[in-house]
Image (cartoon, rainbow, N blue to C red):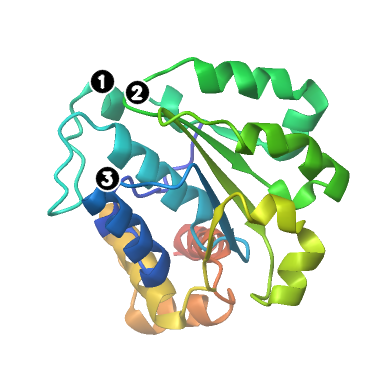
Amino acid sequence: MKSRYLFEPTDFRDVIGQRTAKSAMKAALKKDDFPQNYLLLGPPGVGKTTLGKCLERAINCENYNVDSFLSCGTCWSCRSDAGRKVERAPKIMQDGMRIIERQLCNLRGRKNIILIDEVHSWSHPAQDRFLSALDRRSSKSMLILAGTIDINTSQIISTTFTEAFTSRCEVLYLESLSEKSLTKIICRHAKRLCESISIKDARAIARHRFGNAREAMKLYRTHSLLL
């Protein structure tokens, strides 16, 4: 059962931090002009899959408000969790690419969007085997890939991913969350759960989690249970 301490935003307005990545996605929504593939890179726990899910929801919502960047919450796509399932990269290579190719052809909603996490685990030969999926030519499908790299440098990215792989994606790098952003996230969660936490305690948790929201919420849960 999902922990009540694990809250995941569904719309861009609820995502704290990551202004650059959010701005790029919002601009694409405004223009209704998207790349065929996104590659979201960054340290652990900074919102890569969360932003991917928000984008999928925004694109497929039948009544999306592009001015406020809010989904309606009532259409079939918003009420369905099927479209926001996150595939794990190691499992994809284990089960074979044909599964992904079938999913890309099985249209659900305005666009058939597949989110794949942990693509940093793929070796260079594995990335080469995935190029055929990145090269498909359908305006009705999109791949959103997420991978973990700790430092945003061209050397780290080129070591982890082949040029052939990254050249087929729009690459967005997500920074570690600031202490201020983590403090906001912790305080928002406490309010949502009708719990209280002082700004001082929230900042102390944020300071010790090094920009990782997932780890910050684990520490907040421990803090809450000890009260």
Depth check, front residue: 76 or 45: 76
Residue visible at 67% across and 36% down in the picture: 88
How many marks are shown on the rendered structure?
3
Depth check, front residue: 204 or 16: 16
Q: Give the CA separation, mark 3 to mark 2.
A: 22 Å
Question: As displayed, is residue 182 above or below residue 83?
Answer: below
Q: Earlier in the sequence, mark 3 or mark 2?
A: 3
What label does residue 80 carry, if any? 2
Depth check, front residue: 45 or 171: 171
The residue labelled by disc 3 is 32
Determine crowd level at label 3: few under 14, some 14-19, many 20+ residues with C-alpha closer than 10 A.
few
Q: Nearer the viewer, mark 3 or mark 2?
A: 3
Q: Nearer the viewer, mark 1 or mark 3?
A: 3
Q: Give the CA separation, mark 1 to mark 2.
A: 6 Å
Residue visible at 20% across and 24% down in the picture: 75
Residue 202 image-quadrant placement: bottom left
Determine crowd level at label 1: few under 14, some 14-19, many 20+ residues with C-alpha closer than 10 A.
few
Residue visible at 39% across and 75% down in the picture: 181
Q: Would residue 64 be seen by someone viewing this image from the given angle?
A: yes
Q: Would residue 17 be seen by someone viewing this image from the given angle?
A: no
Q: Are marks 3 and 2 in contact (CB under 8 Å)?
A: no
What label does residue 76 carry, if any? 1
